[in-house]
Image (cartoon, helix red, strand yellow):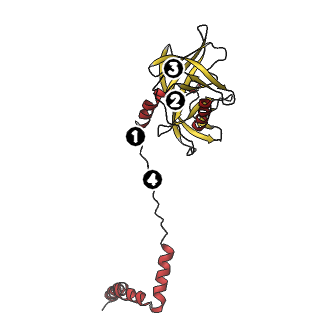
Amino acid sequence: MNKALRLIITLFIGGVGGVVFCTISLPSMIKANVFGFGDIFTNLIAQETPTIIKTEEKITIIDPDYWIDIVKNSKSSSVLVQSFNGGVLLSQGSGIVLTSDGIIAVPLSVVSSQAKTYQIFCQDGVYEASVLSRSLNQNLAFLKIKASNLQVLGFSNNSGLELGQSGIIVGKKMQVSELKDFSQSAIVREIYTSAFYLDTAFSRDIVGGALISSRGELLGMVQINNKNQTFVIPAKTLKDLLEKQLKA
């Protein structure tokens, strides 16, 4: 028998023997832990198998028309306030209807102390208003019109307010002698006890606007400070001031 044939036979026998060993003998030796093979194999598996932690992520899908419905349901509670002296317009801006019988919250800057008359564009009518009170500390005034069954927003207690929370600013403005509703998106970026600040496009038009939550609740009234930062008087503060006004 030549060398080449011996080599082929040797390889064939060795291959068959290897298959038999791996498929029959080795599993039996591991199971019986012969020569400690079971422990060695178990340790190798433990070292090479990574730990996998399954996590669950909650995904909320928002209807792209979601905020459209919020604005539609909220804009009737926003008003335009104009201050006049002898027929001359001194100031104007948005305000918020707080009670169904016509108490309206307005930034103090909109209610000029030099004005003699105040005109309110509210829902389907135009009203003359009287000033109930002014608060220098809050830069806020309460006006009253003679009306009933006005649409009002529910007050948020602001307890669940969070950084990154989104909202929509709703208000009214006069553009080329035409009354216009407007809305503008905003995100809460800083929260303090007496106010919270927004990331939103800068515009004087939004002063006095209502910040509305995704639940359709009033989060507060929008203001701009002397550093041109947009902040909000919380709804809870507005409600507390309103209750004091009603008791006065």
User: Quick one: label 1 or label 4, which is nearer the N terminus?
Assistant: 4
Please state the horizontal and vertical placement of residue 143, each as a whole percent of the image: 58, 23
According to the image, label 3 marks what residue? 146
Query: Please, what is the three-letter code of the amino acid marked with disc 3?
Result: Lys
Task: Please tell me how crowded label 3 is: few (under 14), some (14-19), or many (20+) other residues with Cα within 10 Å.
Answer: few
C-alpha span from label 3 to label 2 = 12 Å
- Would residue 129 be found to the left or right of residue 30 on screen? right
Dots 1 and 2: beta carbons under 8 Å? no
Instruction: State the mark number for residue 63.
Output: 1
Residue at 62% of width from left, 20% of height from top?
111
Instruction: State the mark number for residue 83.
Output: none
According to the image, label 4 marks what residue? 58
Quarter the C terminus occupies: top right
Q: Nearer the viewer, mark 4 or mark 2?
A: 2
| Residue in front for this viewpoint, 119 or 248 | 248
Dots 4 and 2: beta carbons under 8 Å? no
C-alpha span from label 1 to label 2 = 31 Å
User: Quick one: label 3 or label 1, which is nearer the N terminus?
Assistant: 1
User: Quick one: label 3 or label 2, which is nearer the N terminus?
Assistant: 2
Please state the horizontal and vertical placement of residue 161, each as a whole percent of the image: 56, 44
Please state the horizontal and vertical placement of residue 38, each as a whole percent of the image: 45, 86
Query: Please, what is the three-letter code of the amino acid marked with disc 4?
Result: Lys
